[in-house]
């Protein structure tokens, strides 16, 4: 990395120095922590939404299965009466 910076000349050295100066500030570090937390929270929210959607889908199909089981049981009772 140092060789690359050195080969870039004075402009590259100044840019790297400016970058290092900015990233060393507490404000920048706090901002980066906040950004990381925000990305994490967004990922968690998406994961939770997916889980809720999956749960709703399971509940929907569970009710369909239960309805079918009830119909089958009723038909079985009718057949048993014959």
Image (spheres, helix red, strand yellow):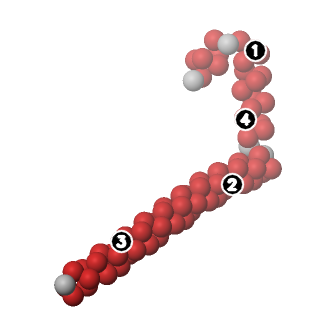
Please tell me which residue is depicted at 26% across the width and 83% down the height of the picture: 78
Instruction: Find out whether the residues at labels 4 and 1 contact each other: C-beta distance under 8 Å.
Output: no
**For residue 10, which numbered disc appears in the image?**
1
Q: Are marks 2 and 4 in contact (CB under 8 Å)?
A: no
- Nearer-N-terminus badge (2/1): 1
Q: For mark 3, does the 10 Å Cα neighbourhood hold few (<14), some (14 to 19), or many (20 or more) residues?
A: few
Label 4: which secondary element: helix
Task: Note whether 82 is above or below 17 in the view shown.
Answer: below
Q: Disc 2 on helix, strand or loop?
A: helix
Query: In the shown orientation, is residue 49 left or right of residue 82?
Result: right
> In this rendering, which labeled residue sits more in front, label 2 or label 1?
2
In this figure, which residue is indicated by the disc labeled 2?
38
Q: Mark 3 points at which residue?
A: 68
Q: Is residue 57 above or below residue 5?
A: below
Q: Label 1: state its secondary structure.
A: helix
Q: Residues within 10 Å of mark 1 (few under 14, many from 20)?
A: few
| Earlier-in-chain disc, 4 versus 1 | 1
Marks 1, 3: nearer the viewer:
3
Q: Distance between the residues labelled 2 and 3?
A: 45 Å
Mark 2 or 4, nearer chain start: 4
Foreground residue among 71 and 2: 71
The residue sitting at 75% across, 14% down in the picture is 10
Whether residue 26 is visible here, answered yes or no, is: yes
- In primary-sequence order, the first of circles 1 and 3 is 1
- Tell me where residue 13 sits by quadrant: top right
The residue indicated by pointer 4 is: 20
* Real-space Cα separation, disc 2 to disc 1, in angstroms: 37 Å
Q: Which of marks 2 and 3 is nearer the N terminus?
A: 2
Which numbered disc flags the more N-terminal residue, 4 or 3?
Answer: 4
């Amino acid at each position: 990395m140092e060789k690359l910076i050195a080969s870039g000349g004075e402009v590259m050295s100044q840019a790297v120095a400016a970058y290092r100066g900015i990233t060393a500030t507490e404000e920048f570090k706090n901002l980066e922590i906040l950004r990381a937390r925000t990305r994490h929270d967004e990922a968690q929210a998406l994961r939770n939404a997916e889980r809720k959607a999956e749960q709703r889908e399971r509940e929907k199909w569970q009710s369909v299965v239960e309805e079918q089981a009830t119909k089958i049981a009723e038909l079985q009772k009718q057949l048993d009466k014959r």
